[in-house]
C-alpha cells in the first residue's frame, strides 16, 4: 500500500471556524484539529497535519498573522508536505492570499479557503471548501501556480480573485478573467495556467500598512487630500473612475502630494478591467495623471495594489522600481 502524501492545514480563524454564542451570533471558536475532524473524507486524500496559527475574524488579521502563516507553510513544505492549505475569514481573504502570493517561494501549492456559512447554519460550506482545498493542494497539476484560492469547488489565482458578494457562497470570482480550474469528483480539473509568473519579493516587516485607499466620487473637489496628508501615510491608492480618471481639482491635489514626496497610485473603481495610459488626454485623464507622476495599477484592485506597495516600500524600493514592478504585476 502506497504512502499517502502529506498536506498541512493551518487555521487562521474566520467564519469557517465560528460557533454560535448566546445571542445566536457567531465568533471564532474552532481550531485546526476541529476543522479537520469535521471532514473525515480528508484522510482518503492525504495525511493531514493540522496546526492553529490564529483564531480571529478576518477584519482582525494583520501582517504578523500572515507572516506567521507564511513561516508555517514554508516549514510544512520543508518537512515534506506536498501542499499547504490555510483557512481564513472571507472578508479579507483576497488580501491575505495576494500578500502570500507576492512572497511564496516554493513550487508546492499554497491554497487559501474559508466559508460563507458558519458551521451552525444549514448548508454550511466550510467542510466542502476545506475538502476541495486539500484536493487542490495535493495535486501535482497545481505546482508552480503560486497561491490559489479555492471555494465553492472553484479554483482562482490569488492575484485575480475578489470577493464580489456579501453573502453568496459563490462570492469568490476573478472579474474579467475567470477561474483557472474546478474541483470535481475529488480531482483538480485545471483548464488554464498563467502566462506570467513573478519572482517572490522580499518578505516585509510586520509593520502596519498605513496606506489608505480613497475612492474618487462624482464632482470630487479633492478636499480629502489635506486630511490624508495630515496622517503622514506611506503611500496613497486612489480608486479612480473609468480607466483611471479624476476631476481636475482632485488631480491637482494629488499632484501636489507627489511634489511633497508622497507616492500616489491609482486603479479603476469599476471592479473589473484595467487602467489605461494614452487613450484620453484631458486634464485629469489617465495620460495626464501619469504625466503628473501618479502610478497606474493596471488590472490590480485597490486592495491588492495597497498590499503590493506595502511589500515594495518595506523593501526600500525606489519610485522607479515601484513603478516598473507595479506595471509588471498589473498587466
Image (cartoon, rainbow, N blue to C red):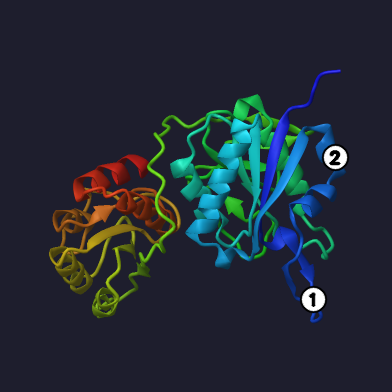
Q: Is residue 327 left or right of residue 11?
A: left
Q: Which residue is more in the foreground, 240 or 319?
A: 319
Q: Which residue is more in the foreground, 92 or 254?
A: 92
Q: Secondary structure at mark 2?
A: helix
| Residue at the top extreme, as displayed | 1
Q: Which residue is more in the foreground, 9 or 265?
A: 9
Label placed on residue 21: 1
Q: Is residue 217 left or right of residue 7?
A: left
Label placed on residue 157: none
User: Which residue is tagged 2?
Assistant: 41
Residue at (55, 57) in percent of width and height: 65
Q: Secondary structure at mark 1?
A: loop
Q: Quick one: quadrant of the N terminus?
A: top right
Q: Residue 302, how many percent across, how many down? A: 40, 59
Q: CA distance from mark 2 to mark 1?
A: 28 Å
- Residue 122 showing in the rendered view: yes
Q: Residue 119, how many percent across, how many down? A: 80, 61
Q: Which residue is more in the foreground, 191 or 66?
A: 66
Q: Quick one: quadrant of the C terminus?
A: top left
Residue at (19, 58) in percent of width and height: 289
Image quarter for residue 121? bottom right
Amino acid at each position: 500500500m502506497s504512502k499517502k502524501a502529506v498536506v498541512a492545514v493551518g487555521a487562521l480563524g474566520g467564519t469557517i471556524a465560528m460557533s454560535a454564542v448566546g445571542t445566536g451570533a457567531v465568533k471564532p471558536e474552532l481550531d485546526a484539529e476541529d476543522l479537520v475532524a469535521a471532514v473525515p473524507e480528508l484522510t482518503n486524500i492525504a495525511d493531514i497535519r493540522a496546526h492553529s496559527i490564529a483564531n480571529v475574524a478576518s477584519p482582525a488579521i494583520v501582517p504578523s498573522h500572515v507572516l506567521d502563516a507564511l513561516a508555517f507553510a514554508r516549514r510544512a513544505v520543508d518537512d515534506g508536505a506536498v501542499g499547504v492549505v490555510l483557512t481564513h475569514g472571507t472578508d479579507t481573504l483576497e488580501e491575505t492570499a495576494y500578500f502570500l502570493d507576492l512572497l511564496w517561494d516554493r513550487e508546492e501549492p499554497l491554497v487559501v479557503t474559508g466559508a460563507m456559512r458558519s458551521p451552525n447554519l444549514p448548508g454550511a460550506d466550510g467542510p466542502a471548501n476545506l475538502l476541495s482545498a486539500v484536493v487542490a493542494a495535493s495535486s501535482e497539476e497545481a505546482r508552480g501556480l503560486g497561491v490559489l484560492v479555492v471555494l465553492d469547488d472553484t479554483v482562482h489565482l490569488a492575484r485575480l480573485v475578489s470577493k464580489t458578494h456579501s453573502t453568496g457562497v459563490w462570492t469568490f470570482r476573478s472579474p474579467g478573467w475567470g477561474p483557472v480550474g474546478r474541483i470535481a469528483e475529488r480531482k483538480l480539473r485545471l483548464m488554464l495556467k498563467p502566462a506570467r509568473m513573478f519572482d517572490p519579493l522580499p518578505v516585509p516587516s510586520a509593520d502596519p500598512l498605513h496606506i489608505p485607499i480613497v475612492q474618487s466620487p462624482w464632482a470630487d473637489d479633492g478636499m480629502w487630500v489635506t486630511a490624508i496628508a495630515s496622517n503622514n501615510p506611506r503611500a496613497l491608492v486612489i480608486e479612480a473612475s473609468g480607466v483611471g480618471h479624476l476631476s481636475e481639482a482632485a488631480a491637482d491635489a494629488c499632484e501636489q502630494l507627489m511634489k511633497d514626496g508622497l507616492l500616489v497610485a491609482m486603479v479603476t473603481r469599476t471592479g473589473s478591467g484595467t487602467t489605461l495610459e494614452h487613450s484620453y488626454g484631458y486634464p485629469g485623464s489617465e495620460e495626464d495623471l501619469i504625466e503628473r507622476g501618479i502610478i497606474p495599477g493596471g488590472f490590480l484592485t485597490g486592495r491588492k495594489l495597497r498590499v503590493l506597495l506595502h511589500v515594495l516600500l518595506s523593501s526600500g524600493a525606489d519610485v522607479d522600481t515601484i513603478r516598473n514592478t507595479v506595471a509588471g504585476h498589473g498587466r
